[in-house]
Image (cartoon, coloured by chain):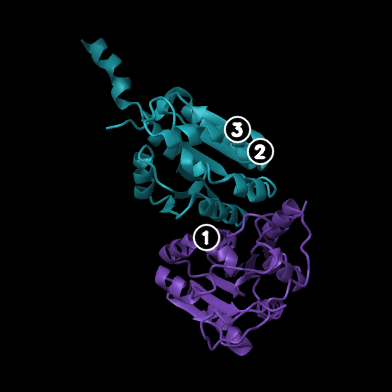
Chain colours: A purple, B cyan
């Protein structure tokens, strides 16, 4: 069942698919870029898109994908870092956008998957339905904040994020499809593998 | 006369609590210091800002700072979170769902409000939730009351947190800091 859209503002952005966009992003990562997948479907689709050692799958702590990615970006300024977050999750930690704008890490990009619903809990509408994520981010001071018009535009914006100084925020409108995969719920192993992927630890 | 002058020396030159904390953080390579401010912590925050060794910055919420420090730790950089008691009270979910299961050696420095002369009933009530939450999650915590124990406890706690991949809360008592009283 698709979410009612009649009460949403008219937008010229295509409704895309989270898993498809996640695969398009991952296909462009050639330099061991770090990716932090937010709670639920966002990291399920990241998991399904290929289990890179540089992926961190966040299982709890809703809203913290952007802060975690910011921490990675501050620790490793030579590595590009992507945060993947849903609109409902971002609403829980809007203040983090202001922190990111203030610290302005050049190597951080945020991708917001906006379907206007808490898909995983029963597709209840989020309170972002009337909100413009890009306007919020720009208002916080992340000047390079953009809606992706379609898949081709999304890929272009990812290329921009990979080649120019950030922080960058890319917002995409997505459909109401559930995640494709299901992340294995082993936080300690996920954390250890991520640290190995970042070159901080060696396997024992 | 000479003896009196020498006897008076230690009292005037002994370091204050926030200098000890700063030097102990530095000695343990703890360099990223997000905070949500507190009046009692102000001298520590100011001296951290003034020292280029540290990257010191405010976050909108304490929970956000925990996320930043978790990411930084996984990326190979150490940090510590400064906050007051009421800020700690917002952290139960992130401690239970990120810090403890992922074995993040989160170092928390909490300025203790709500006791020993508190004037704000909200602070005194929320203070009573802090140690039960820490105990429920089996997170190591120490209440720092004495200047002569401060360096030892902070230094050893940081080392233990890193070595055992476990969080620690260092509670700065009004007995150490003077606390905050109604002006």
What x and y, as percent, mark residue A78?
A: 55, 67
Same chain under badges 2 and 1? The reply is no
Residue closer to the observer: A171 or A176: A176
Residue at the image point whose x is 63% and y is 84% from the top:
A15
Q: Is residue B133 visible?
A: yes
Residue at the image point whose x is 49% and y is 76% from the top:
A132
**Of the residues under marks 3 and 2, which one precedes in the sequence?**
3
Give the residue pinned by disc 3.
B132
Location of residue A164 with respect to B107 vertically, above or below = below
Residue closer to the observer: B133 or B105: B133
Residue closer to the observer: B85 or A176: A176
Which quarter of the rendering shows the C terminus of chain B?
Answer: top left
Which quarter of the rendering shows the N terminus of chain B?
Answer: top left
* Structural crowding at the residue carrying mark 2, measured as other residues with C-alpha within 10 Å and reported as few (<14), some (14–19) or many (≥20): few
What x and y, as percent, mark residue B117?
A: 38, 26
Same chain under badges 3 and 2? The reply is yes
Tell me the tag on residue B137: 2
Q: Are marks 3 and 2 in contact (CB under 8 Å)?
A: no
What is the chain identity of the residue bearing mark 2?
A: B
Quadrant position of residue A181: bottom right
Q: Are marks 1 and 3 in contact (CB under 8 Å)?
A: no
Location of residue A98 with respect to A18 vertically, above or below = above
How far is the residue under mark 1 from the one under mark 3? Answer: 26 Å
Tell me the tag on residue A93: 1
What x and y, as percent, mark residue A37?
A: 65, 65
What is the chain identity of the residue bearing mark 1?
A: A
């Amino acid at each position: 069942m698709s979410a009612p859209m009649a009460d949403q503002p008219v937008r010229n952005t295509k409704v895309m698919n989270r898993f498809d966009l996640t695969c398009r992003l991952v296909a462009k990562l050639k330099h061991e870029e770090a990716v932090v997948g937010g709670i639920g479907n966002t990291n399920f689709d990241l998991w399904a898109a290929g289990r890179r050692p540089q992926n961190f799958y966040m299982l709890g702590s809703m809203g913290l994908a952007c802060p975690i990615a910011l921490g990675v970006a501050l620790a490793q300024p030579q590595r590009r870092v992507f945060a993947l977050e849903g609109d409902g999750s971002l609403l829980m930690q809007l203040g983090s956008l202001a922190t990111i704008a203030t610290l302005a890490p050049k190597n951080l990009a945020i991708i917001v998957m906006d379907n206007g619903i808490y898909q995983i809990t029963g597709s209840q509408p989020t309170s972002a339905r009337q909100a413009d994520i890009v306007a919020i981010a720009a208002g916080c001071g992340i000047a390079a904040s953009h809606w992706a018009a379609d898949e081709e535009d999304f890929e272009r914006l990812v290329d921009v994020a990979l080649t120019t100084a950030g922080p960058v925020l890319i917002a995409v409108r997505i459909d109401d499809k559930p995640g494709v995969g299901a992340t294995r719920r082993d936080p300690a192993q996920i954390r250890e593998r991520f640290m190995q992927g970042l070159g901080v630890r060696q396997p024992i | 006369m000479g003896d009196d002058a020498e006897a008076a020396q230690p009292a005037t030159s002994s370091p204050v609590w926030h200098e000890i904390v700063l030097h102990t953080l530095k000695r343990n390579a703890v360099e990223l210091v997000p905070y949500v401010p507190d009046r009692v912590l102000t001298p520590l925050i100011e001296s951290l800002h003034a020292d280029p060794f540290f990257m010191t910055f405010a976050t909108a919420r304490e929970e956000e700072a925990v996320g930043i420090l978790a990411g930084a730790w996984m990326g190979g950089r150490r940090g510590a979170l400064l906050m007051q008691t009421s800020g700690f009270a917002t952290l139960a979910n992130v401690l239970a769902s990120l810090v403890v299961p992922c074995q993040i050696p989160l170092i928390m420095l909490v300025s203790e409000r709500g006791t020993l002369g508190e004037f704000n009933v909200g602070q005194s009530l929320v203070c009573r939730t802090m140690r039960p939450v820490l105990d429920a999650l089996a997170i190591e915590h120490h209440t720092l009351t004495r200047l002569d124990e401060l360096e030892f406890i902070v230094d050893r706690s940081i080392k233990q947190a890193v070595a055992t991949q476990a969080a620690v809360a260092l509670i700065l008592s009004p007995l150490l800091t003077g606390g905050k009283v109604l002006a």
